[in-house]
Amino acid sequence: MHPSRLHELLAAVHRGELDPHTAADMFAAAQAPELQGVVRIDHDRPRRLGVPEAILCTGKRPEDVGAIAAAVVAGGGDLLATRADRACWEAVRARVPDARWEERARCIVRRREGAPPPFGLVAVVAAGTADVPVAEEARVTAELLGSRTAVAYDVGVAGLHRLLPHLQALRRAQAIVVAAGMDAALPSVVAGLVPGPVIAVPTSVGYGASFGGLAALLAVLNSCAPGVAVVNIDNGFGAGTLAHLINARAHRAGADEALPAGPG
């Protein structure tokens, strides 16, 4: 366990916010190798990077996902498991009863006790209803990390008038995630209308010539609109994380500006 995390535990016990037995369990969980050395959780990542380590459920046995989730929670961290199916959810729920399954996003989440309230604004946009699962993964990720979110779904370029009522909210956002398949034109359109950075998520939605999202990926990589960043195909988690980091940096900058000037 990192010294700063140990200090937090001891301070919580001193303030009466955490009983000594729970603190000891959390310390032991953070110290012990998880799953016989096969998995080693990066408990220090939130302090180091500002975001916790996420569990990618793909390729893992449900019982291993459950054990990892329990170790994350015992270590005092926020829980985020992505690409979770029902078997993984049942395994986690058995070990972490107060976890929540966001079925459409295929995510399992649990915010730690005492987590600060959400801040700023991350907007999440989906071109079509078929793109919503990827957009929801981005939304759930950003919210778990601490960002306030707003969504605009089924507003693709085939009926662009549907986007217009959401422009005011999009212009207030510190970052905008746009999930789109097929020709993936929507991220470029949004980037031409709003001042914030746009994070394009090409999705694998489309017919044969979409090549599982490759056409969408190439389209957004070739965007003529400035201010568009691109993550991998269907990577809602990566987009939500990046959007949150942008939002958090802007939030900290605003807080710094509000501080009184120091001497000199």
Image (cartoon, rainbow, N blue to C red):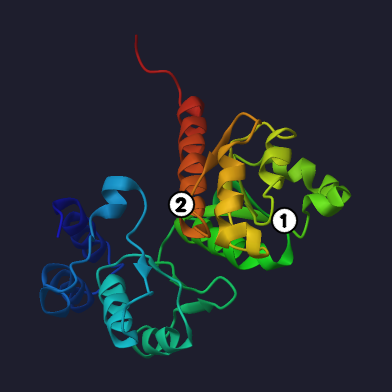
Q: What is the distance, in whole Å, between disc 1 and disc 2 at their CAs?
A: 20 Å
Screen quadrant of the C terminus: top left
Closer-to-camera residue (244/258): 244
Residue for point 55% across, 54% down: 214
Closer-to-camera residue (16/179): 179
User: Could you tell me residue 233's position as x and y percent?
Assistant: 51, 56
Q: Is residue 154 above or below residue 71?
A: above
Q: Is mark 2 on a helix, strand or loop?
A: helix
**For residue 43, which quarter of the picture?**
bottom left
Screen quadrant of the N terminus: bottom left
Identify the residue under disc 1: 127
Judge from the rendering whether residue 136 lies leftward or rightward of residue 52; answer left or right: right
The count of marks equals 2
Closer-to-camera residue (224/264): 224
Judge from the rendering whether residue 79 lies leftward or rightward of residue 30; answer left or right: right
Q: Given the current orientation, which residue lies at the most extreme front position?
A: 209
Which three-letter amino acid code belongs to the residue tagged 1?
A: Ala
- How crowded pointer 2 is (Cα within 10 Å; few <14, some 14-19, many 20+) is rated as many
In terms of sequence position, does the residue under pointer 1 or pointer 2 come before the other?
1
Q: Given the current orientation, which residue lies at the most extreme top position?
A: 264
Identify the residue under disc 2: 241
User: Could you tell me residue 77's position as x and y percent?
Assistant: 32, 65
Q: Is mark 1 on a helix, strand or loop?
A: loop
